[in-house]
Image: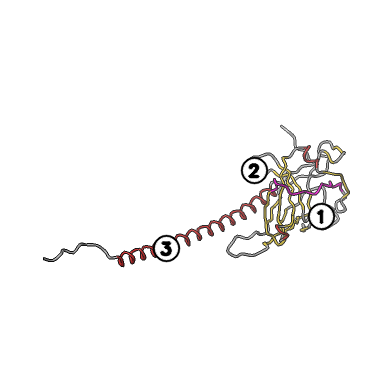
């Protein structure tokens, strides 16, 4: 009488099945890892592009929100009405102004005293564009003013401010830059000179420019990312600093 064979698998078949399952699991793991790495790289590039675009939009809004403000006090000197010097510092590496745009509250917040300036980049490589914000008031506006000097171009009294310093509250608008500098579209303040506007690296005292340009270029060019570019902001001010507004 024959013995009835029992159904089952051999040890070799088990080893083959386990090996195939391991290879399949390994392939799925590599596919998931490649997909997650690609997703992370894409997300990092999108975030970098958003930071660059957001910083440039903030820079444009801050400059276009420039307010016509005069100092009520400078050092020990006090002024009445709008007889004080214009609160606007404009050099190639530093800019000080009052803007209606705030980083924290956008266009709905309190006017801010902005200090934009250039500092060395991390590890001394390149430069970065930094801004300090201070809520505006007649008292805070004159705290950084040390005194007055005569401007050689306009002949008016120009305020001398303390140099701005970066702090933990400073906001980096642009980083890893090969260079960054400010320039100003200015009409000559003298009637005997041509009135064709010119781009200057220092604005004369007594008024505001027609436009402000921030020239910058990335330290390392990457065609796969959005690069910092020069920003030009028109300034919509059409009155002299000595004209006072009336409340009705």
Name the foreground residue: 162 vs 89: 162
> Image quadrant for the C terminus?
top right
Residue 66 horizontal/vertical position (percent): 72, 46
* Disc 1 packing (10 Å; few <14; some 14–19; many ≥20): some
Which residue ends up furthest to the left in the rendered image?
A: 1
Residue 168 part of the magenta segment? yes
- For the residues bearing labels 1 and 2, Cβ distance under 8 angstroms: no
Q: Is residue 122 left or right of residue 223?
A: right
Q: Which region shows up in magenta?
A: 156-170
Name the foreground residue: 58 vs 42: 42
Q: CA distance from mark 1 to mark 2?
A: 36 Å
Residue 160 horizontal/vertical position (percent): 84, 47
Name the foreground residue: 154 vs 110: 110
Q: CA distance from mark 3 to mark 2?
A: 48 Å
Residue 34 part of the magenta segment? no
The residue wearing badge 2 is 104
Q: Residue at x 68, y 59 (%)?
A: 176
Q: CA distance from mark 3 to mark 1?
A: 73 Å
Q: Earlier in the sequence, mark 3 or mark 2?
A: 3
Q: Which element is circle 2 on?
A: loop
Q: Residue at x 31, y 64 (%)?
A: 14
The residue wearing badge 3 is 26
Q: Earlier in the sequence, mark 3 or mark 1?
A: 3
Question: Looking at the rendered structure, which numbered label has been put on residue 210?
Answer: none
Q: Which element is circle 3 on?
A: helix
> Image quadrant for the N terminus?
bottom left
* Disc 2 packing (10 Å; few <14; some 14–19; many ≥20): few
Of badges 3 and 1, nearer the viewer stands: 3
Residue 142: quadrant of the picture: top right
């Amino acid at each position: 009488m024959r013995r009835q064979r029992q159904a089952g698998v051999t040890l070799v078949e088990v080893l083959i099945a386990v090996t195939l399952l391991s290879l399949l699991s390994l392939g799925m793991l590599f596919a998931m890892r490649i997909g997650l790495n690609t997703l992370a790289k894409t997300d990092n590039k999108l975030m970098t592009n958003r930071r660059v675009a957001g910083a440039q939009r903030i820079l444009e809004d801050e400059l276009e929100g420039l307010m016509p403000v005069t100092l009520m006090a400078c050092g020990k000197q006090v002024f009445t009405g709008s007889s004080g010097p214009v609160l606007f510092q404009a050099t190639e590496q530093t800019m000080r102004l009052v803007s209606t745009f705030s980083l924290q509250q956008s266009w709905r917040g309190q006017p801010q005293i902005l200090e934009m300036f250039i500092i060395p980049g991390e590890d001394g490589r390149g430069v970065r564009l930094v801004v300090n914000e201070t809520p505006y008031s007649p008292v805070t506006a004159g705290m950084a003013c040390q005194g007055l000097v005569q401007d050689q171009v306009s002949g008016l009294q120009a305020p001398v401010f303390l140099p701005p310093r970066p702090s933990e509250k400073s906001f980096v608008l642009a980083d890893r830059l090969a260079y960054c500098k400010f320039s100003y579209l200015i009409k000559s303040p003298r009637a005997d000179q041509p009135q064709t506007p010119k781009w200057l690296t220092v604005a004369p005292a007594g008024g505001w420019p027609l436009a402000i340009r921030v020239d910058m270029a990335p330290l390392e060019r990457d065609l796969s990312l959005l690069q910092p570019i020069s920003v030009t902001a028109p300034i919509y001010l059409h009155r002299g600093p000595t004209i006072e507004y009336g409340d009705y």
